[in-house]
């Protein structure tokens, strides 16, 4: 289910934060790169078996193929948005986790 996949992306971000003392930062492709091993320890936090998908642009995308929006709240807290089935960000069907 899409909400479980989003929870798994959140888990990957949190695992990264636990190891490196803060969240990955940047745009979706930059964060995705860091989560896929482009980090100082070359650890891959993205597991396709948990439903994580990456598009041709190197972005983590939701179940509908729309890139996630990562909003850095603090060094240790990040909000992750999925546009939901309508593929329009900031509408009533969005899925969001912190």
Image: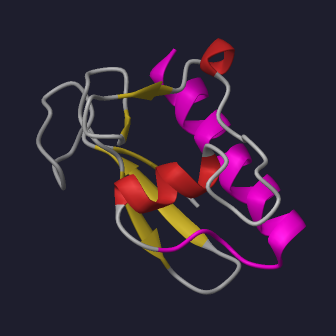
Q: Is residue 97 visible?
A: no
Q: Is residue 98 visible?
A: yes
Q: Position of residue 66 (x, y in %)?
A: 23, 34
Magenta run includes residue 18? yes
Left or right: where 84 falls relative to 49: left
User: Looking at the image, is 19 positioned above or below residue 94?
Assistant: below
Residue at 43% x, 61% y: name it: 30
| Residue closest to the eye, 40 or 49 | 40
Magenta run includes residue 47? no
Left or right: where 65 falls relative to 98: left
- Examine the residues drawn in magenta and state their main secondary structure: helix
| Residue closest to the eye, 47 or 92 | 47
Residue at 26% x, 29% y: name it: 56
Q: Quarter-wise, where is residue 84 in the image?
A: top left
Q: Quarter-wise, where is residue 22 in the image?
A: bottom right
Q: Position of residue 80 (x, y in %)?
A: 46, 55
Magenta stretch: give its range.
1-25
User: Looking at the image, is 65 positioned above or below residue 17?
Assistant: above
Residue at 11% x, 42% y: name it: 88
Q: Position of residue 4 (x, y in %)?
A: 60, 26
Left or right: where 2 falls relative to 5: left
| Residue closest to the eye, 62 or 47 | 47
């Amino acid at each position: 289910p899409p909400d479980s996949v989003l929870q798994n992306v959140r888990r990957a971000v949190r695992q990264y934060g636990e190891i490196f003392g803060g969240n990955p930062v940047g745009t979706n492709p930059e964060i995705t790169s860091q989560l896929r091993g482009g980090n100082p320890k070359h650890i891959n936090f993205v597991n396709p078996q948990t439903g994580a998908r990456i598009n041709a642009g190197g972005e983590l995308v939701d179940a509908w193929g729309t890139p996630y929006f990562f909003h850095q709240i603090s060094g240790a807290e990040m909000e992750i948005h999925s546009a939901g089935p309508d593929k329009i960000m900031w509408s009533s069907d969005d899925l969001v986790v912190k």
